[in-house]
């Protein structure tokens, strides 16, 4: 249950920065449709580990990645900076404690990494790695 809560929290933060973002809901990013490239993101929950179980509560840690696909067009440096700023805005919004939902105890952006793409010189890809800690009922 908390995996869907983490995913929902991330979706809200991305859409809160720019409502035109679309989530790619497939398991893999490899088959992203070329016509649906700009402002597309994919949430991957890579590892879940239990931090503590105490009576009625389970405290879990989630490590994951949000992959952003954004157009770069021809003015590559200016668009790179603008796209990096956009992803950074999502990160700043996500780590804001005032935005935490019930059960979310911690959200840390570990890194934002530009990833080169071989297939399209107009495409920019950024990966935002995160760690989230979530507490929910054991029952």
Image (cartoon, rainbow, N blue to C red):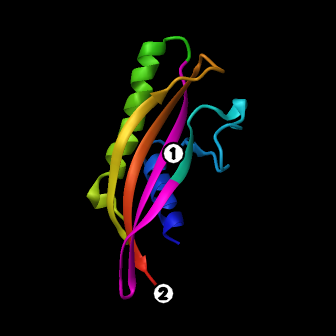
Which secondary structure class fits the magenta region best? strand
Mark 1 Cα-neighbour bin, 10 Å: few <14, some 14–19, many ≥20: few
Residue drawn at (53%, 20%) of the image: 72
Q: CA distance from mark 2 to mark 1?
A: 35 Å
Is 134 above or below relative to 15? below
Is 95 above or below relative to 57? above
Residues in magenta, as a range: 46-72
Circles 2 and 1: CB distance less than 8 Å?
A: no
Residue drawn at (39%, 22%) of the image: 81
Q: Quadrant of residue 73?
A: top right
Question: Magenta includes 54?
Answer: yes
Question: Magenta includes 120?
Answer: no
Label 2 secondary element: loop
Q: Which residue is mark 1?
A: 19
Q: Quadrant of residue 121?
A: top right
* Mark closest to the chain's N terminus, 2 or 1: 1
Q: Nearer the viewer, residue 36 or 19?
A: 36
Residue 105 percent across, percent down from the top left:
31, 66
Q: Nearer the viewer, residue 67 or 93?
A: 67
Q: Quadrant of residue 100?
A: bottom left
Most distant residue in the left direction: 97
Residue 132 percent across, percent down from the top left:
38, 58
Mark 2 Cα-neighbour bin, 10 Å: few <14, some 14–19, many ≥20: few
Most distant residue in the top direction: 74
Is 12 above or below relative to 56? above
Residue 27 percent across, percent down from the top left:
66, 50
Is 129 above or below relative to 81? below
Residue 17 percent across, percent down from the top left:
42, 43
Q: Which residue is mark 2?
A: 139
Kindly report which numbered mark, 2 or 1, lies closer to the viewer in this rendering: 2
Residue drawn at (48%, 46%) of the image: 65
Residue drawn at (57%, 45%) of the image: 42
């Amino acid at each position: 249950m908390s995996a869907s809560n983490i995913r929902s929290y991330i979706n809200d933060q991305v859409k809160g920065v720019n409502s035109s973002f679309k989530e790619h809901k497939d398991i893999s990013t490899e088959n992203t449709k070329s016509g649906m490239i700009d402002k597309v993101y994919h949430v991957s929950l890579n590892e879940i580990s239990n931090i503590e179980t105490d009576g009625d509560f389970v405290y879990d840690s989630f490590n994951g990645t949000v992959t952003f696909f954004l157009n770069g067009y021809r003015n590559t440096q200016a668009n790179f900076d603008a796209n990096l700023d956009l992803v950074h805005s999502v990160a700043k919004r996500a780590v804001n404690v005032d935005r935490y939902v019930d059960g979310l105890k911690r959200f840390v952006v570990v890194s934002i990494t530009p990833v080169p793409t071989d297939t399209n010189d107009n495409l920019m890809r950024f990966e935002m790695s995160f760690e989230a800690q979530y507490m929910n009922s054991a029952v």
